[in-house]
Amino acid sequence: MTTLPIALVSYLTVSLNVVRSQLVPRIDRSSLLRIVIPSLTIPGQIIRPRVRHYENRDRALAFEKPISLLVLLRAWVLGYLFALGLLMLPSAQNPLAALAQAG
């Protein structure tokens, strides 16, 4: 059983997510962005109504977008690691060795 088609589709999907998220000048949300960003804004939606003063609310929510970018970067790296691990799988002894080679 070959993993080449799955690896190529995974690699191209992650690459398209990166390009659509970072390089396209208009607002064009990729599928990964649609998953990551709302999951990180839920805590902010819970905090917003409970904090009355604008300064305190702004301080609490200031970290929402930088954290979402870091989580998105981690998702991209893990996606590339998975795709490259699948590409290395035929030449490795086991899946963990393939992931180690990909890393």
Image (spheres, rainbow, N blue to C red):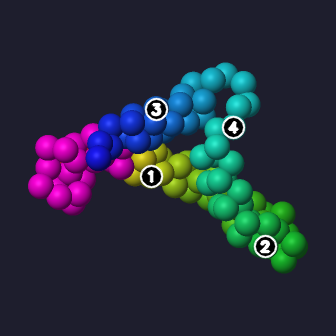
**Circle number at residue 46:** 2
Residue at the image position 57 percent from the left and 25 percent from the top: 23
Residue at the image position 62 percent from the left and 54 percent from the top: 36
Left or right: 13 as drawn, with respect to 65: left
Rendered position, 35 above or below 56 = above
Q: Foreground mark, 2 or 4? A: 4
Report the residue marked by disc 1: 74
Rendered position, 32 above or below 52 = above
* Residue closer to the observer: 83 or 55: 83
Label 4: which secondary element: loop
Count residues near mark 3 (Cα–Cα under 10 Å), then give few for <14, some for 14-19, many for 20+.
some
Q: Main secondary structure of the magenta part?
A: helix
Label 1: which secondary element: helix
Of the residues shown, which amino acid type is indicated by label 1?
Arg
Whether tag 2 and tag 4 are in contact, CB under 8 A, the answer is: no
Report the residue marked by disc 3: 12
- Whether residue 90 is visible to the viewer of this picture, yes or no, is yes
Q: Earlier in the sequence, mark 2 or mark 4?
A: 4
Whether tag 4 and tag 1 are in contact, CB under 8 A, the answer is: no
- Residues rendered magenta in the picture: 80-99
Q: Is residue 39 magenta?
A: no
Task: Find the distance from the CA under tag 1 to the CA under tag 3.
Answer: 17 Å
